[in-house]
Image (cartoon, coloured by chain):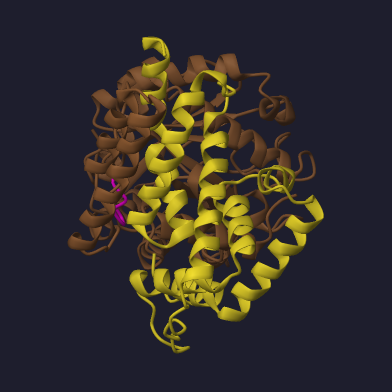
């Protein structure tokens, strides 16, 4: 059973509450600690409990507030959640060549700090792509698309071996990695999405993946739960895996019509997301099709991105080879380049991601 | 206990201790008590470490934590007189993060013990209704009804509304 909106909100609230810092006054705290210590010591003496409990316990006690515990052999790199801190890009052939990204960077006037790649499932972690992104001061954003793969099989653990290998590769990379799984699942157009897979199955698969990664110590992953800017047959909250399984929320959207505005493209979806979670939002795939008037819409996009307090945007800079003019690349339109550069300059302040 | 098992136990405490302590906090609303609860559960777990299902020691520790907490509660209920009810938070306040947490915590504190356990296990620990039933030793139907009652109560208390208002006001 997928969670209702209220249940998802509650889950998020509990997580938020449990992450709060303990405000206990020091004196009282010491008294309780002493009591706990005495109780523990009593157990050690009477039950013959070995020193390990004591050692482990002391580690815990001394780690107040409880945010300071270390997991063994884990990679810790994480990304700051700075509003307007990210500019990302998807390029055709991103993993194979940095050249298109360099051209985009020239046009945008900034080196992007996120570089996106769409991969199939199960494929190994695109390590060379990740290294290349890192060498250029960016974090890799890997969208894993489970095309034609059974999500219930993933949830049931049939892919655990591959996931462990993937997670180990990510962990040994050691730098921040953004990973999305089954993007646009609330849309009907993918085999892993709405009407093909139930929200409960999607959620179970997502949680399985995150759990396996954590067990492998791959905690350098920023989990990007990515939805499309549409209303599907299910409420968005039905697809929500829970706040402990998600780091950022991604919203994919594009200006398709001349009447589109930030509010109609991204705004309504962001409002829905904020009904059940406070996680930071990234415009994880943003495009403006040329026929709707790129220049004005690009300015609107950047303005909305800032107004809605998002992390930034990932530009979809890939020409579509379908009938009609479908080329959102800014490099092919000088006016779009100016608008984009203006947006980057005025609305973004990129954070270092190393 | 063999060294290998001792190391496994320490790894477990290091990896999961913080999460379990947070779980304890949601039950007790008190960091010191949460730590006390966890220590007690770990001390009881350690001698049985070898026999515990190695795939899921966390479930075992969690169960001891809930049972221990229940027994504390019973003890206190008999020996202590409850203090005055918690301060009511006026509706329409602008909640900051801290205020919101206080509202949620106060709402949790007002829940009956079993409802609170169901809520935390179901919505924070992400256990299924069946798993919660098994852990608490009650029927799945009871888990469902307790969760529904608790949710209704949290709605009435306005804990969920205040949170939404904060979000829509633009609090990221």
Tell me the residue at 28%/26% (across/down). A134
Q: Residue at x 34, y 70 (%)?
A: B98
Percent coordinates x, y for residue A206 in the rendering:
60, 36
> Which residues are the magenta region?
A80-84
Closer-to-camera residue (A232/A23): A23
Residue A67 visible in the current orientation: no
Against A3, residue A153 (above or below) is: above
Left or right of A253, for residue B31 = left
Whether residue A81 appears in magenta in the rendering, the answer is yes
Image position of B27 (left or right of B13): right
Given the current orientation, which residue lies at the most extreme left position? A27
Magenta portion: prevailing SS class? loop
Q: Position of residue A353 (x, y in %)?
A: 25, 37
Give residue B166's position: percent from left, percent from top: 44, 74
**Residue A96 occupies quadrant:** top left
User: What's the residue at 64%, 43% (across, down)?
Assistant: A324
In this rendering, would A30 be left or right of A148? left
- Hey, which quadrant is residue A99 in on the image? top left
In the image, B1 versus A130, the foreground residue is B1
State whether residue A220 is above or below residue B65: above
Location of residue A343 (image quadrant): bottom left
Q: Is residue B115 visible?
A: yes
The colour with which the image depicts chain B is yellow
- A41 w.r.t. B72: above or below: above
Q: Quadrant of the C terminus of chain A?
A: top left
The brown-tinted chain is A
Q: Which of A328 and A204 lies nearest the eye of the viewer?
A: A204
Number of numbered labels in the structure image: 0
- Tell me if residue A146 is in the magenta stretch: no
User: At which x and y percent is residue B73?
Assistant: 52, 61
Q: Which of A186 and A90 lies nearest the eye of the viewer?
A: A186
């Amino acid at each position: 059973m997928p969670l209702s909106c209220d249940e998802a909100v509650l889950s998020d609230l509990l997580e938020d509450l449990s992450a709060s810092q303990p405000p206990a006054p020091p004196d009282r705290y010491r008294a309780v600690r002493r009591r706990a210590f005495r109780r523990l010591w009593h157990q050690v003496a009477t039950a013959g409990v070995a020193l390990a409990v004591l050692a482990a316990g002391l580690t815990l006690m001394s780690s107040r507030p409880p945010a300071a515990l270390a997991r063994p052999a884990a990679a810790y790199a994480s990304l700051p959640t700075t509003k307007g801190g990210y500019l990302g890009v998807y390029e055709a052939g991103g993993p194979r060549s940095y050249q298109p990204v360099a051209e985009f960077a020239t046009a945008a006037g900034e080196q992007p700090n996120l570089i996106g790649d769409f991969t199939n499932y199960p494929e190994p972690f695109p390590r060379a792509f990740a290294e290349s992104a890192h060498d250029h001061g960016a974090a890799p954003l890997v969208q894993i698309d489970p095309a034609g793969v059974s999500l219930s099989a993933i949830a049931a653990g049939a892919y655990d071996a591959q996931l462990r290998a993937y997670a180990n590769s990510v962990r040994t990379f050691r730098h921040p990695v953004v990973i999305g799984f089954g993007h646009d699942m609330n849309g009907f157009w993918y085999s892993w999405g709405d009407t093909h897979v139930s929200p409960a199955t999607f959620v179970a698969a997502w949680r399985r993946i995150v759990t396996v990664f954590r067990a492998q110590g791959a905690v350098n992953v920023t989990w990007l739960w990515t939805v499309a800017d549409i209303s599907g047959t299910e409420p968005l909250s039905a697809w929500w895996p829970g706040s402990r399984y998600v780091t950022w929320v991604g919203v994919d959207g594009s200006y398709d019509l001349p009447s589109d505005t930030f509010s109609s493209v991204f705004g309504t979806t962001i409002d829905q997301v904020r009904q059940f979670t406070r996680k930071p939002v990234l415009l994880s795939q943003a495009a403006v099709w040329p026929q709707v008037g790129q220049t004005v819409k690009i300015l609107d996009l950047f303005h909305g991105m800032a107004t809605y307090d998002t992390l930034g945007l990932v530009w979809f800079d890939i020409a579509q080879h379908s009938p009609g003019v479908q080329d959102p690349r800014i490099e092919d339109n000088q006016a779009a380049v100016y608008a984009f550069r203006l947006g980057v300059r005025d609305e973004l302040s990129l954070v270092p991601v190393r | 206990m063999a060294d290998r098992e001792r190391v496994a136990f320490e790894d477990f405490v290091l990896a999961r201790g913080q999460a379990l302590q947070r779980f304890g906090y949601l039950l007790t609303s008190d960091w010191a008590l949460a730590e006390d609860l966890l220590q007690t559960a770990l001390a009881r777990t350690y001698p049985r470490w070898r026999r515990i299902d190695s795939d899921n020691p966390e479930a075992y520790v969690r169960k001891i934590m809930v049972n221990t907490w229940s027994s504390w509660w019973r003890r206190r209920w008999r020996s202590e007189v409850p203090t005055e009810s918690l301060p009511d938070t006026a509706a329409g306040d602008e909640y900051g993060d801290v205020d919101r947490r206080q509202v949620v915590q106060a709402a949790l504190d007002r829940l009956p013990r079993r409802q609170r356990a169901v809520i935390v296990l179901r919505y924070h620990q992400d256990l299924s209704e069946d798993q919660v039933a098994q852990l608490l030793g009650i029927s799945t139907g009871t888990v469902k009804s307790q969760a529904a009652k608790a949710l209704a109560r949290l709605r009435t208390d306005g804990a969920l509304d205040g949170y939404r208002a904060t979000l829509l006001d633009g609090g990221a």
